[in-house]
Image (spheres, rainbow, N blue to C red):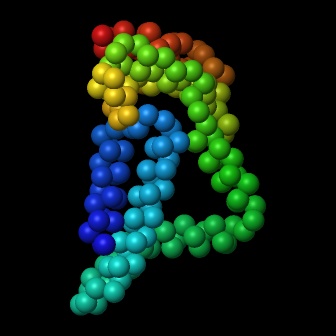
């Protein structure tokens, strides 16, 4: 069980580092939640491993989650509305989606609840007729509140043009 949990964590981490995404932003969040749950399971199983050095190593692995829980409890109830709004922002559906070509799709997400207002255009490559797993190949971030300080306006067509 510990090995399976470690494999789930490894697959999700490798996918995140290489830019692989699923067909929806919410599904990506579910994958991250599954990885955190698998991390907890792996740590719990490793805690019981003999010799105690392995259990100590599992305790060190569990430290980030325990520290996060301790900080949340220390900050109290004031932190939960902020965390709730962050989760709503992260899981929000894209403002605009487009199929640029049979193997390229585009998503535009609005950003700026806690930062400069703007949007980000993501271009994702996927196998034809199977857009379940997608690889981010390009993105452009545009700041609407300070247009002179950020990159020029972007669209799905302009970001995907060099990839065709």
Residue reaching furthest bottom?
A: 51
Residue 137 can be seen, yes or no: no
Above or below for 68 versus 90: below
Residue 108: horizontal and vertical position, in percent?
Answer: 53, 23
Above or below for 115 versus 7: above
Q: Looking at the figure, which quarter contains the N terminus? A: bottom left
Residue 155: horizontal and vertical position, in percent?
Answer: 50, 13
Q: Quadrant of residue 21?
A: top left
14, 130: nearer the viewer: 130
140, 93: nearer the viewer: 93
Is 50 left, or right, of 5 in this rendering? left
At 70% from the left and 59% from the top, the residue drawn is: 80
At 59% from the left and 33% from the top, the residue drawn is: 93
Residue reaching furthest left?
A: 51
Residue 40: horizontal and vertical position, in percent?
Answer: 43, 70
Above or below for 85 versus 138: below
154, 34: nearer the viewer: 34
Residue 8 can be seen, yes or no: yes
At 59% from the left and 73% from the top, the residue drawn is: 70
At 44% from the left and 61% from the top, the residue drawn is: 36
Q: Quadrant of residue 109?
A: top right
Above or below for 46 versus 114: below
């Amino acid at each position: 069980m510990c090995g399976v949990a470690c494999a789930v964590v490894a697959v999700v981490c490798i996918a995140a580092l290489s830019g692989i995404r699923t067909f929806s932003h919410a599904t990506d969040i579910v994958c991250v939640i599954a990885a955190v749950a698998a991390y907890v399971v792996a740590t719990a199983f490793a805690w019981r491993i003999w010799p105690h050095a392995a259990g100590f190593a599992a305790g060190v692995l569990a430290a980030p989650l325990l520290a996060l829980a301790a900080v949340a409890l220390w900050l109290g109830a004031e932190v939960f509305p902020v965390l709730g709004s962050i989760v709503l922002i992260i899981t929000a559906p894209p403002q605009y989606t487009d199929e640029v070509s049979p193997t390229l799709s585009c998503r535009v997400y609005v950003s700026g609840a806690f930062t400069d207002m703007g949007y980000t255009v993501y271009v994702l490559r996927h196998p034809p007729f199977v857009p379940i797993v997608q690889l981010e190949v390009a993105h452009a971030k545009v700041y609407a509140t300070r247009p002179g300080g950020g990159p020029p306006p972007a669209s799905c067509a302009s970001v995907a043009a060099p990839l065709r």
